[in-house]
Image (cartoon, rainbow, N blue to C red):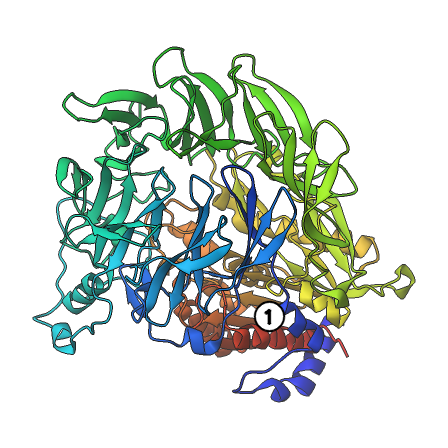
Amino acid sequence: MRSVYCLLGMLLALPAIAVESYQKPSPAMQDLVDAPLPPHVAVSPDHRWAAFLQRSYVTTLKDLAAEEAKLAGLRIRPSTFAPSRQTPYREIQVVDLDSGAMSELELPEGRIFEAEWSPNSRYLGFVIEEREGLHFWVHDTVRGESRRVSDRAINGVFERYYTWYGDGETVLTQLAVNAGTIFEPDARLPKGPAIQETGETKAAVRTYQDLLRDERDSAYFEFLATSQPARIRVPGGKVTELGKPGLYVFLAPSPDGRLVLAEQLQRPFSYIVPYYRFPLHSEVWNSKGKVVTTVASLPLAEDVPPAFDSARVGRRDIDWRSDLPATLTWVEAQDGGDIKADVEHHDIAYQWAHPFKSDPEVLFRFELRSAGLSWGTAETALAGEWRYSDRRYRVWKFSPDGSSEPVVFQDRSYNDEYNDPGSPVRTHNRFGQAVIQVNDDGTVFLNGRGASDEGYRPHIDRYDFETGEAERLWQSQPPHYEQAYAVLDDGARRLLISRESPTENPNFFIVSTGSDEERRITHFPHPFPEFQGVKKELIRYQRDDGIELTGTLYLPPDYQPEDGPLPVLMWAYPLEYKDPNVASQVRESPYQFNRIGFWGPLPHLAQGVAVFDDPKMPVIGEGDAEPNDNFRKQLVSSARAAVDVLVERGIADPDRIAISGHSYGAFMVANLLAHSDLFATGIARSGAYNRSLTPFGFQGEERDFWEGQSVYATMSPFFHADKVNEPILFIHGAADSNSGTYPMQSRRMFSAVKGLGGTARLVMLPYEDHGYRARESILHVLWEQANWLETHLGIY
């Protein structure tokens, strides 16, 4: 029967969809593209104000087609010295949490970036991309007005716009040195060929895109990325330049405001790695921009081992200790950057206090690779460490002043959500720095997702490091899904939470942890009323090796069981695990809002199909085995289990099931069509299909091509294109910058299927990256997918 549907579809529909212009799907799907996204929320340090930042993911094709420089792993808008692909905010609302009054800020047109409250809570700072460049703005809660602070344009090439000083009246920023000037074309004329040569050490690097190609690119990169460090006083807008212009990737004032940590890139640049592997010079300045001391000068890092938990040699992750006036910290690898080296400690953290006359002190020794430090007080800080090979993640509570021995706070697989206790709630200290909130009795508050077999149930706990015991203060209660966004007082008696249900859009409330008292803050309406009544169910099932799996089933609003089996669209993404018990964990909640976003499979509910979203596709390698050693077998087994459970429940017509996915999910789609006959068709978006084009590892695979040729060949659907005997739709952004998913991957896979007599369609989206942003592109993708499903699932 499946072949009848496919043949009928090819005869009736293929000529009708061979178009060369942008198309639009049904009105219901179009409305999804324009529906508002949930806002990002920023609460002021004094808990008086909340900013609701409305995001704007969708843009226009004209915006995407604007001039763009692709240099050193960055994408830059030359006209404004801004990132060209960063997702901005489109509007800002500020709420007085005491009175509930909400005001929408009146701002000029332009993308909005980096909204952050000042430490004194008076100002909400943000950057607006105006016609002549990026400018720093504030909303003044005392005066109730928003204004541009300075006419000097900011350089946002490295997506670091400004940092507040602890006084809440001053920011440290980077001015666009070359704003208003044009890069001279003659300066881009080559002085000679681009030359590279090998050295004595291995330099295995993963596949990066948008790299520098020659000296012309290098000069243009310097022109766009060069900035002038400066302080800007919010009252009055006075600008004070510090130091000299340079390629500054990080600027940070010391907590006491007397010093500045400045890190800048230096030559020689590289043609094989992005900017963050370029030589890096770190130094400390005084308040006038004069050098106090040099902290590190790291050489070009082209030879970092390709393992996921390898590291650059030398002093890295340099920053200020948030709980002291002016003390630097950093981490240094003890294994040459190679996690596979047999050493007692792979990293050591150091601290160095101003005036930097004595030697740096050892702060913490990491048995694994450092995952970062979090500061609270002299007696309480956290040190995280991890290792990829067994997915181990461990966090220590330690005393920076040495007053007590370190104790383990958590020790688990980083895939293990059930045993994640949550993240410490933060507050602002006397320096205006965000630090762990440590209570008088030494306890902390933890904000956790509450993962369990019943789904997510977020919570707030009071946790005692000494006893390891947690007291539950608040938890999300069925039939709602609630999340705590902020603890509003020192005792965690008042919380700002969001609340939703399958039929209720998330809205915000202030609740009491000791009573039923609550106050509603927002009244966001249902964003897509056409999809009200969609039925949602978390389904549990097993694959043939006993691994427990879950997926979320969505049914059209008007579906009744007596209607019988439906065509089904599955959307999935494989993940690697070392522990089968962790692979079976539930990672959703049955009480979350039925958010019908345009990105995944849910828009196609409008076509009357059932959607099985995120059926788990775990790839497990226990002990010495690697997950990918049996990738195909486990993938097909998981897919078969998903198909079987839907057929057994009478939901799915087994001859009318489509499989779809994006990126590694697209890689999955091509593999399933090549190595099973479970699906009538597939939709593969922005995937990679030939792993020999990513020879130094991909996704969760650390072995290079020469170590694991059989794995690379077995997993690459390009090598098995002759077995793809079901129709497949390829969609890819023509400007995809994601590592490994070159646009060529889809072109070559399509050519292989076509050349071997298979049925395929290739859609290349002009100017689009790994994720599609232009409204025209997104609407066309929905139209393509809808037509493909109608054709190959027999939807008429």
Q: Quadrant of residue 73?
A: bottom left
**Residue 224's spot in the image, x, y percent?**
24, 64
Q: Is residue 62 above or below residue 51?
A: below
Quadrant that contains the N terminus:
bottom right
Q: Is residue 287 above or below residue 725?
A: above
Residue at 34% from the left image edge and 42% from the top image edge:
307
| Image-based side of 125 in relation to 295, left or right | right
| Image-based side of 621 in relation to 315, left or right | right
**Residue 672's spot in the image, x, y percent?**
59, 59
Q: Is residue 274 at all visible to an observer of this figure?
A: no
View extreme (left): residue: 191
Task: Report the front residue among 198 and 474.
Answer: 474
Quadrant that contains the C terminus:
bottom right
Q: Is residue 376 at all visible to an observer of this figure?
A: yes
Task: Report the front residue among 576 and 314.
Answer: 314
Task: Report the front residue among 743 and 366.
Answer: 366
Task: Report the front residue among 49 and 32.
Answer: 49
Label 1 neighbour load within 10 Å: few <14, some 14-19, many 20+: many
**Image mark count:** 1
Q: Quadrant of residue 788?
A: bottom right
Residue under numbered circle 1: 725
**Residue 471's spot in the image, x, y percent?**
65, 21
Q: Amino acid at mark 1?
A: Asn
View extreme (right): residue: 562
Q: Which element carries disc 1, helix, strand or loop?
A: loop
**Residue 18's spot in the image, x, y percent?**
57, 86
Q: Is residue 41 above or below residue 110?
A: above
